[in-house]
Amino acid sequence: MRGFINLVDLLNHWLFNFLAIVFGGIAILTVYQVFARYVLNSPLVWSEEIIKYLMIWIVLLGTAIALRKGLLISVEIVLHIVPKKIQKVMQIIITLFNITFLFLLVQYGFTILETIQGQTTGAIELPVSWTYAAIPVASIIALVNCIAVFIEIFISKDESGVDNNGTTIIH
């Protein structure tokens, strides 16, 4: 079980670093877009779409990582409201709800991909399915993270269950 958790944490570490690089690229592209529009008077037609679609991927994949680290505010608030004695039970209930929701989101995401097959974006003629693929892909990663959280709840020695400080993701 610990091997699975370590594998998930390694995946999250690499994904986090990849997202940081993509986010840096978006920042550079945004600055260049502003420069091209206002200084060169030649706006980029494709950059806005690329930025928008990459931000969708960043948010959804980042949410999957945040779920693993317990950094989603709704989960944190519920866990801090209840007494210490029932926090582990609440963590189990929350995690089971998350697993159910994510399983349904994976199914719904693949249904969306089937529905929009063949559609392309306006400016760059990118398949729309590449953008909407973020839903099932991020949901699968979040589901794997949720399973790791569920396992960690049971193998954890302390009463609080999962390490929720979020600092272990950045090495």
Image (cartoon, rainbow, N blue to C red):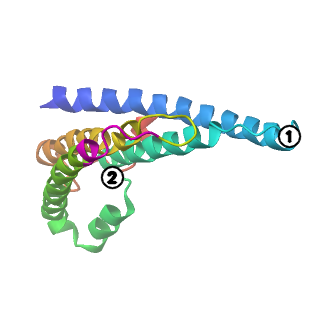
The residue under label 1 is 41
Q: Give the extent of the magenta segment.
A: 112-120
Q: Is residue 91 above or below residue 29?
A: below
Q: Earlier in the sequence, mark 2 or mark 1?
A: 1
Q: Amino acid at mark 2?
A: Gly
Q: Mark number for residue 72?
A: none
Count of numbered tags: 2
Front position in the image: 7 or 43? 43
Q: Is residue 124 left or right of residue 108?
A: right
Label 2: element kind: loop
Above-or-below relation of 171 to 49: above
Relative to 20, say whether 84 is above or below. Answer: below
Which quadrant of the structure image shows residue 116?
Answer: top left
Q: Nearer the viewer, residue 90 or 18?
A: 18
Task: Characterize the local packing of mark 2: few (<14), some (14-19) or many (20 or more) Cα atoms within 10 angstroms.
Answer: some
Q: What's under tag 1, amino acid-wise?
A: Asn
Q: Are the two marked residues, 2 and 1, in contact with CB atoms closer than 8 angstroms?
A: no
Check if residue 45 falls in the magenta segment.
Answer: no
| Image point (32%, 49%), residue name | 67
**Residue 89, image x and y in percent?**
12, 63
